[in-house]
Structures are given as structure tokens and as C-alpha cells.
Image: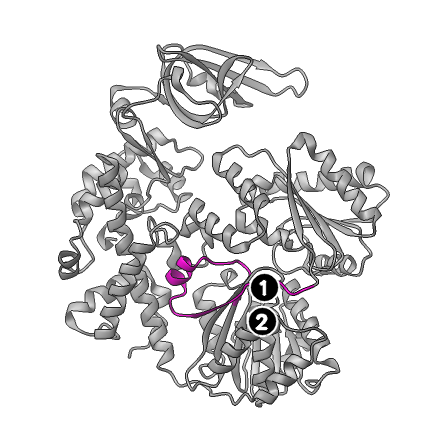
Amino acid sequence: MNGNLADISIQFVKGVGPARKKLFANLEVESVEDLLYLFPRRYEDRRNMIPIAQVQTGEWQSIAGTVRTFSERKTWHTKKQVTEVLLDDGSGVIVCVWFNQPYLKNYFHSGKKVVCYGRVDLYKNRLQMISPEYEVIESEEDEQLNLQRIVPVYPLTRGITQRYLRKVMKSCLDKYGDQLRDELPAPLRRRLGLDEIRGCITQIHYPDDPERQEAAIKRVSFEEFYFFQVSIILRRMSIKQKEGIAHKVTDAFSLRFCDAFPFELTKAQKKVIRDVKEDMGQPVPMLRLLQGDVGSGKTVVALYGCLAAADGGHQAAFMAPTEILARQHYENICRFVADGPFKDVSVELLSSSLKKKDRDEVLQRIADGQAGIVVGTHALITEDVTFQDLSYVVIDEQHKFGVRQRALLSEKGNNPDVLIMTATPIPRTLCITLYGDLDVSVINEIPPGRGTVETQHYTHEEADKAYDLVRRRIREGRQAYVVYPIIEESEKLDLKAAQEMFRKFKTSLFKDQRIALVHGKMKQAETEAIMRDFKAGKIDLLVATTVLEVGVDVANATVMVIEHADRFGLAQLHQLRGRIGRGEHDGLCLLVAEPKTQDGQRRLEAICATTDGFKIAQYDLEIRGPGKYFGRHQHGLNELKVANPATQLDVLELARKEAKALTAADPFLKKNENREIRRVIGRRYPTYLAMVAAG
């Protein structure tokens, strides 16, 4: 990417200006560089459009035609406004239907040329598309950019159309394309035969043919992977060269730990415990990622390291992303150490909801070393927390924390061992990309005695059947969740709908059951009180927003309804589903949804077909790409604008090989010829490079 173009505001691109600049900010586009690196999410080959007479029903297809008729009506039962447009391309006609979009009459005038993309169905012996994406072709310039070529389809925000964005992109490329500069070193480009960046960026936006577009994507992907890998390898080298604490963990301790459980640990758990024991014995800091599906018993492994550190006279810290989850870990650890061989270990909980007096007392016990294990939230990394001898750190659900937060907790000790846990299974390709600085362990077994979980899909009209199943389970003595989505863009409306649903349940569907509502706008103490009652069996049905997503553990909850399930990502659905079937009884997850997009349909099919978290993660990565996979905390991933480890393993491995060769020859990029690479990494990944020692 190019520094000078990063300094030019998008408002200076023809067709933007100050007002539309604000709209582009919703797409995280603020500079000319941001715009040039806003890559298409897919392409449509419009060089030879399929004639309407030859479209396949059941398929998602692009068609172009002329508006013959436009009509509006209201449905007699729901009073929804229906807009119908008849398109004709000379070979045949198709009806395009939209609901509750009265403004469409401003666009679909008779004789206008229109391109539509959607699923083709047959209804009453006529071809139709329901709610297709559409573009109205207004001029000859429109036709040149939007027809008779391979057309880019971009991510959009309200107020920006495909047609407008393509026009702005063309203006930007014409004016600023020549200022794009190659940041990969010339010798590397020559050796690998890589094309110039300028031509590649143009081919990604406006490809001449699929082959050149594919080659351009590979070239830009290599660059993104290469700089990211160099930054990760530098970070690992800088940590591994530090002197850590060589814990003396004996076999007798390991035996004592495993024997303290009333059940046999799985083979996978025992293997990871051996990995952790070996790492802790080394004089360099452990950097290990522990992956395991929801309910696989990762916490047992994390606890092993905590107790090993405390047993050796050191301290351990356990950081969780939410107060509910931190308290749950704290209570579980306290129960385990209460009357077994580790009863002398002092366990403390540090959270932001503690009263000042209590907090000060906990801080004092941490500072003077009385606290052997400290469990907490972000509160652990605040300035006033001082450990006497922190030697082991656990970070749970790591994708909720940024790289910098990870480092801040480590800085509380003298290069402590770090174990990072995630219940979001990460495909191997993404592990190499994102966690090249970590060793990876996987728990791929579920402890015996757990129930299985079946997932079923219902339309909104069939929702009553789903709720009948919920009532049946409650009558059998089980508990249930109903999860409702709340997304930022329509937070107030969503919350209102969730509250309305709760009222309806109380007065009709579930009027004989004990029912409660939790949502993100409630006070922490109120949420926790309800969760405690639910866990204690005092509530039959809990209506909740996604505050449930991470870590609530109620063995008797065996059924979950997820309303508007198409609005959740795959990883989110999998996490939510992991809240049920945690005891001996089988779980039932009921998805109520009518997906409006092809991706939405595929997500629901995937979640119903498998409970294997790794398969789901791979699928999710392929659909969304890596930048959206973990959200904004992982700054490095957001720099992968086009590179996708799910589909480009060969490019990733080549980039990693080259990055390793570079850092082996010049570990801290001090040679003159590599200073430019260090500057580029400093600009692209400041949080990574800031943590790399000077060497």
C-alpha cells in the first residue's frame, strides 16, 4: 500500500465531496488508498448475459432487460406493499418482485434498461425473482462501466450504489493510479516474476479477462501475506529471545492434578497438558494457542498451568472477555481447589464491578503475592494492578482481545508463559496466517457423557412448531433459551422487537412458565442476578440477546431457539449452539429464519449439516474472507484486503517461506536494503512492530 495516497482524503476524488465522504466512512474508506484497496466481493461476467428464455430455475443468475410494465399493490393478509416490474430482453420476460420499497417507482420507468441478480423461481407458470439486487442503466457511460464486461460487485452501505461506486472507482484509478508504488523489494519481484502493483490494482477492479484478474489477485495477496508474515515472525523472535521462567513441574504434580478430577481426562487433554508442561520447563516464554470446540475441556488444561505456577511459588492470571465468564471461571476454579490437593492455593476475582474497598484489598493481595491465581476481565491490565511474580498467563476467547491487550497482560510479569484459548475453531490456514507467532495445540475430543445437539431450520410461518418443541422440553423439566439478534445499525428497533417478543411470551405462549429477559442495555448486576437464577433452575425460559455468546454453562438447558438466525454469522451461530447439550441430555437448536441472500442460505445449510466446529470455521472463512472473520480487534487481519488463507494456501506458504528467509538473514531488518520493509510494516501493522524489541 502507498503512504502518499493514504494522506489524500477521499473527498478529492471526482464525484465524492464532503457530504459523500461521510458515507464512505461507513465502508472504512477515508483516503484514496483506502478506496483503491476496497476490493470487489465478487464479479459478474456480463460480456455475454444469459437470455431470459434460458435462465435456470433454482439458480442465482444475472439478467438484463428493458422495463415493460411497473405496478404496485398491497397483499390482502399482511398489507405489505408489493412492487412488480416486468423485464423483457427480446427472448423472454421475467417478473421482479420487491416488498415495502415504494421509492422504486422513481427508478423503474418504462423503457429503462435494468440489470438484476437473484434467485430465479417459477411461480404460477411465470419466471420471477424475489428481491433481486438491481442496477438501472442511465447512460452510455453507465453501459460501458456496467455492461459488456466483467463487472465488479462491491460491499455497499446505505446511500452508495454499485453504479455510483464503479464510477467513483474509475475516476480514482484514472487520476491516482499512476501514483501507486511497489512496496515489495525489486529483487524479490524480479526473482518471483511478480507484476507491477499499478496494473494489478486496475485488473482487480476492471479485469480484461478472468485469467488476468486471478493473476492480479494472487500478486496483491502475496504482498499482503508477505508483510504480515514478516511482522509476525519478528514479533515471535523478539519474544523468544527474552529470558523467561523455567518452571520446575514434576511428574508427581501432573499425576496429582489428573487424579483430582472425578473423571478421566481425554487423550487430547492429556497431550496438551504434556505440551504445556514441556513449554513451562523451558527458559524462554511459552507462546501457545489452545483451540478446542465449545465444551471440549480447554479450561482443565489452562488450570493445569495456573496450578503448576502457583505450586512453584509464582502467580497466574486468567483473563476472560466478560464479567459473566470471568465469574464462571472463578467459581469453577474455587470449587476445584476447595477440598482437594490444591486447597492452599488462593484464588481471587478482579472485575470492574467490585466496590473500591474490596478492589483495594484484592489489589493488595495480588501485589504482595498472597493471590496464587487471579481471574478477571480487562480489569487485569489496568495500571493499578501489580503482581509480585506473574509467571503464567491464560487469555480466554482471545479473538475478543487485541494483540496489544495480550501484550499488556504479559508486561505485568517478567516474560511469563502465555496460553491463549479459543472456542472459535480456526482452520490451519488461518492459524499459519494469524498465529505464526504461536505454537498451536488442538483438543478435538468432547469429554464422554455429553449430549449431542441436533439443529433444525424453520420459516417464520413454522415458528409455532419450534415453540411447541420448547414447551415440551420445559414440561420434561429442561430449560430453554430464545436468542434475538441486536445489531448496531438498528439497535433500538431490535431491542424493541426483543422486548415485544418477551411480553408476548409472558401473556400467551409461555404464560404458565417462569420466564426472564436479558439484554446488553441492562445493568451488569441485573444481568448477573438473572443468570444466577437461570443456572439455579428458578427460570424455565430465558429470552436473551447475544450476551449469551460466550461461556454461559447451564447443563439443564437443552433447547435453544435463534430468531432471525440469518442475521448471525456462522461462528456466532456455532458459539450460541454450544450453550446447549452441555450436560447428559441431548440438545435441540431451532433456527427461525428466511434468508434473503445466497450466502445466508448456505450458512443455514452448513450449521444444520454439521456440529464440527472446524468444518464450520473453514466454511465461514471461505464465505466472508479473513478480514470479517474475527472483527476489528485483529488489526493485522483487517489489512488482508484481498488475500484469503482459506483459498490461497499456496500463495500463503510461498510468502511465509520468503518472510522466514528474510528474517533469518536479517533478524531485525537493520540492513540498509531492508529498512524500507521495516518502514512499510511499521505503517501497516503498528501494533505488531511496536512490540518488537530493538534487537
**Residue at the image point whose x is 18% and y is 54% from the top:** 182
Residue 655: quadrant of the picture: bottom left
| In this rendering, position of residue 331 left or right of residue 669 | right
Instruction: Kindly tell me whether residue 371 is visible in this rendering.
Output: no
**Residue at the image point whose x is 18% and y is 46% from the top:** 198
Q: Are marks 1 and 2 in contact (CB under 8 Å)?
A: yes
Region rendered in magenta? 421-448
Using a 10 Å C-alpha cutoff, classify the residue at mark 1 as few (fewer than 14 neighbours), some (14 to 19) or many (20 or more).
some
**Residue at the image point whose x is 21% and y is 74% from the top:** 665
| Element assignment for label 1 | loop
Residue 240: quadrant of the picture: bottom left
- The x and y percentages for residue 505 are 78, 40
| Element assignment for label 2 | helix
* Front in this rendered view, residue 136 or 396: 396
Say which mark, if any, is on residue 98: none
**Residue at the image point whose x is 53% and y is 46% from the top:** 569
Report the residue marked by disc 2.
Answer: 267
Describe the colour scheme in one phrase: one colour
Say which mark, if any, is on residue 445: 1
Using a 10 Å C-alpha cutoff, classify the residue at mark 2 as few (fewer than 14 neighbours), some (14 to 19) or many (20 or more).
few
Q: Is residue 322 above or below residue 414?
A: above
Q: Amino acid at mark 1?
A: Glu
- The x and y percentages for residue 256 are 65, 85
Could you tell me how far apart the alpha carbons at marks 1 and 2 are, in whole angstroms?
Answer: 8 Å
Q: Is residue 336 above or below residue 552?
A: below
